[in-house]
Every structure is written in structure tokens, then in C-alpha cells.
Image: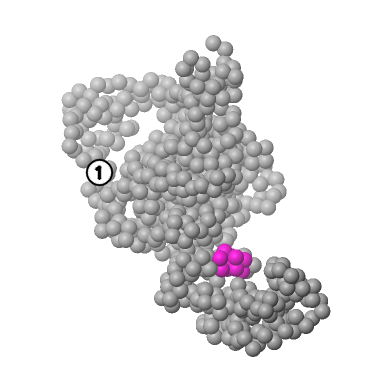
Amino acid sequence: MAVAILGAMGAPSPESAGSPIPCPLSNEEVCKAARLARLEPDPATHNRIGEELGTILGYFQRLQAMDLEGVEPLSHPLDARNRLDDDTPRPGLSNEVFMSLAPESEPPFVKVPRVLPGQSGA
Amino acid sequence: MARRLEDIQRVIPKIGLEVHVELATRSKMFTRVGNPACPEFEDSEPNTLIDPVVLALPGALPVPNRAAVEMSVRVGLALGCQIATLTKWDRKSYFYPDLPKAYQISQYDLPVCGDGAIDIPVHDPKSDEVRTKRVGIIRAHLEEDAGKLLHEWPGGGRIDFSIVDLNRAGTPLLEIVTAPDFDNADDVVAFAQALRNLCRALGVTEGVMQKGHMRFEPNINATLELPGGHTVVTPIVEIKNLNSFRALRASIEHELREQPQRWVEDGREMGPGAKTTRGWDDQREVTLLQREKEDAHDYRYFPDPDLLPVEVDRAWVESIRSAMPELPHERAARYRRDYGLAWKETAALTEEPGVGELLDEAIQSCIERDIERDRGARLGANLVLQCLFRLANERSVAPGAMGIDAERLGGVIVLRASDRISANAAERLLEMLIEEPLTDPEVLAEREGLLQVRDDSALEAWVEEVLADPAMAASASDVRNGKTAAVGRLIGAVMQKSQGRADAARVREMLLERLHG
């Protein structure tokens, strides 16, 4: 799937773009990446995902081999700058709307499964 | 080799500090719904400061708040930081019900402020000396706060689930990271207090600790010196979410006591993966290990594709720089140097925003009315410290927001400096000015009979009345017999008769002439 996305964005396929060294991710690495993303892919797909991710990383290996001395880092693919908004408050959504969107609520709060105190990490 | 506590010859602490400051912009960091860190919205009902961006509804896009960037630049300049010409936004993966996007927008490699240093004063209460401590600033970056997860009903009441209030989600946070330049808790607290004063003076936060406007996270470890020139370095401990200076000091002192002991017990040293996170138990005054998943810190930062980099225009930075006020610790140093005020006085005068400005302008208005600067400053400082602070406290308002302007405060100082009113009358006059802020202090003093009576004939009449009072005979006799100190009681009696209006210095002269003459 990841390769398909790159293909759709016009990136060269690994075959046509020379020789990124395909180095599939191990099952363990795939499981870790999935855990961090809170995904539970079917174990039968782990090998395929590992290969696809390995191919993507192959592109970065090629990029890392390039001499980028004196080249400004690219922080966004668009060569544009963000606009900043004036600090003028506007009305938001009502609590009623929010409660109607929430899977479970105890108005005016959203109800979630019990979480241990002090775990927040932001 | 067995590890023994008695073998540790010296403990050399190393402490760095992360500070989260909630910026008091009117709207949030990436959307324009109200920000609860701004007084205008702080009492909003739960889950009412929300909109599609806060709730991460599909299609919602963030737009950064100019005021938050400007406030960050202001703080960065005050901390001597380099201000980035280009700053960008990154996603920090974060799965938790208090942030619906499942990531926090933060800044990873191009923060708005980098590489600075600030000299802060540290007061030693024992010697009353003030020394300067230089603190390096690694960076200060902008991000958004998370919402609040509650595990009981507000005000108490058990629940077997958790509830979410997203009002705070998206509040602009400035995270300031110092270099590990501290070796004791006193210096850390002095820095934290100086930073709070500075941020309040710059108008970027109200700095109310109980409301979580500022939160501290010290990183602490120590080098342990052992026999034979050996040293070991203990693993770094980060203490999360401290919201009082007391907790900041106590938790650091606790860690510095515990870390040598911990090393004796487990032998763990600094190294990859050795850093731990601890929470502070305020009741038991101990730090507690926060159990985290092994990869809890694997945040997988990546550039936020929804946000373009922001160019921080140099002309903009220069206009912010040119509007920077004198910083509280600089003003305090000037007061100590120029006016000879004590540390405690200067600390009080510069803690509350607006007070130093009011005093400085009042002193200036005194100078323009031919009052010597140092005399005006001393009398003005006393009036503010002893009277204005008390009156403000009684009315639960900030001393700078009492409605007394510098011109009128200056007027009271002038009357006092030229001995036309007594110290007590000056206090009463200030109190009256709160009710009648537009009246000229001299007019008010005259109308209320607060001006000192210096007319000798009026003073003489009171002096004679007091000396004729049999209750005063013993004191009068003491003065006649050379016990000059006894004159104080007689002066007091004259002041009472004159309802505080008699010129005490002239009364003293007259009494001594009369009794010795």
C-alpha cells in the first residue's frame, strides 16, 4: 500500500530509480511500528508490510547518500510560508453539539474508559 | 566492588529545567475559539471552548495564532535567545483521550527561539548578599496544550470511568528548556521565580501557579565521587508537572538525597534508556516512579503537512524588541543600586506587573517638582510597600490596578517629601484617592484637614495644653532633668490633640525649648 501511495505521488518505482537496497523490516520492527500507531495488522500480512516499508526506507538510504553540502533543508514540499491569524476569538461549537458527536457522554463531559491518573504525557 | 553510601565522598548535582508557560492569548494556538488561559475565558463551562479544530473533526485545518508567536519572541528576546527566521511545526504522536487528533502540534528541529542565556539574581537570605547566576537557554518552542482528563467528578464524587474536558486542548504553550546549568535547588527556584516575573511583566501570562499557567519539570542527576578518584554518574530523573515553587524545591532536594542511595541499591548509572520519569507526591513529599511503556517516548516526530513553515520577519522582531519593557530583575537591580533599597523591598516592588512602572513614573513626577530623586524614591517605595500593597490586598486587586495614577502618587510623595503631611496622613490620603482618583492630592489633603499645622501660634496652644495636663507632669519633669527621650510621650499627646496634623519636628523643638529654656 505504501508503495502504491508513493507511486501515485509520482515517485519513481524502485525498479526504475536505480537500486535502493531493499532491506525488509523484521517482524519485530513491523510489530513495534504497528503498536506505536495503535494498529493491529493481520499477522499474515507482516512479511509483506515489512518488505513495503523496507522499500520506502530504501529511498531514504539513497537520499542520505547524496552530497547536500550547502543545500537549504526543505521543511515543506511547498515553497510557501504559512499565514498567521489575528488573535480574535470566534464562537465555537456548543456543548450540546459536542455531546451529540461523542460515542458516550456524561454532559457536559465526554465519557472514556478509566485511565490511570498522571499518565498524560503532552 | 560493593557499593556503600559511606564511600561517596561528594555529590555533584546537575539540574536542567523545562518550563511550560500557557500563553494568555485570547484565542487558541491553531484555531480562534477562546483560550482558557486568558482571563476572559477562564471561567468557561467545561467543553464549551471547542470547535472542529479542537475536536479534530475531518477536514479541520490549523492556522497559527500571530499573538502566540509574538509572545514567544518577546520571551525569547528577554532570555537572550536567537529568534529563528524560519520556524516550523511538527507532529508528536500522542494517543490519549485528552487530545483528539492523536498527535500534538509542537516544534522539533526549528523552534521559534534557540540558544540564549540570562543572568538572574540569587539572594542569600543568611548573608543578604545578591549574586548573579547565568542560565543557558537551549530553546523555547511553541506547542499546544492537551485537554483535562478527570478521574472523579469536579468537586469530588467517585466514578468508575474517566471524563474529558477539552477546553484547555489547544491552549498555546511555550516550552522553555534550560541547559543543565544548576547545581542546587535554590538556584533553580530563583530562576523559576525570575522567569515567572519576567513572563508576567511581558504580559504573556497571568502566571497563576494554582491554575497551571506555569508548570515545571526538572531533570536531575549527580556525579558521585568515590575513593581513588573514581566517579559514577547517576541516571537522569525527570520530575513531571510541578506547579508550585515549593514542590519544585522539595522534589529536587528529595531527588538529590535519594539518588546516591538509589545507586547504592541498584548500581544503575547514566546511559541509554536509563532515564526515568517520576511524579511528585505533595503529601508524602517523595518522588514516585511513573511506570511507562518501554516506547512511551517514541513520539515519531514528523513535519506537520497541514502547516507551512512560518517566516519570522526581522522587522517584526525588531519592532517587538524596541517595545520591550525594563525586565523585573533589571529594575530590581537598579532600585538596589540607585536607591539603596533592600532585596526584600525590590523583590516586592518588581513582582507585581505595573507596580515598578507606577513607582518610576511617580518618582519622575517628583523630580519635575524639585524633589530630590533619592528622597522621592525612598518615600515612594515605602508608600507603595506599606500602604498601596495593604490597600490592594484588602480590596483583592492588583496594586497597579487601584486607579491611582503616577501623577497623583507623585503628588502624595511631594507633600510627604516637603513635610506638608505626616506619614499617617500620606496613607490616609492614598486611601482617599482610591475613592476620588481624579482629585488633586493637595486639594484633597487640604479639604480633609490632613496638611500639617506649622503655624507656631496653633502649635503653641497645643503644647501649652499638654504641659498643663497633670498626667503629663512626670514626662515633662523627666525632660527637664535631662531625659530627652521622654519628650516622645509629650509629642504623642500633641499629635493626638492635633489629630495628627501638627508638624512633629517643630513640636519637638518647641517642647524642648519650653522645658529647657
User: Element type at marker 1?
Assistant: loop
> Residue at 29% across / 36% down in the picture?
A5
Examine the rendered structure and indicate whether residue B394 appears above or below residue B464. Answer: above
Chain of the residue displaying label 1? A
Residue at position x 19%, y 33% from top? Answer: A68
The dominant secondary structure in magenta is helix
Circle 1 sits on which residue?
A: A77
x and y, in percent, of residue A75 in the image: 27, 42
Up-down relation of residue A78 to residue B320 (above or below): above
Residue A87 vs residue B455, the one in the foreground: B455
Q: How is the image coloured?
A: one colour
* Picture coordinates of residue B83, whole percent (x, y): 31, 49
Q: Can residue A44 be seen in this view?
A: no
Q: How many labels does the image show?
A: 1
Residue located farthest toward the top when viewing the structure as drawn: B1
Quadrant of the rendered structure where residue B69 is? Answer: bottom left
Q: What stretch is highlighted in magenta?
A: B382-391
In the image, what residue type sits under mark 1? Pro
From this viewpoint, which residue is outermost toward the bottom? B457
- Position of the C terminus of chain B, as image quadrant, is bottom right
Image-quadrant location for residue B370: bottom left
**Residue B288 among those drawn in magenta:** no
Check residue B386 for magenta coloring. yes
Residue B73 appears left or right of B439: left
Q: Position of residue B316 (x, y in %)?
A: 29, 58
Instruction: Give the camera-side residue of B223 and A95.
Output: B223
Compared with A42, B333 (above or below) is below
Q: Which residue is drawn at 44% across and 24% down?
A: B272
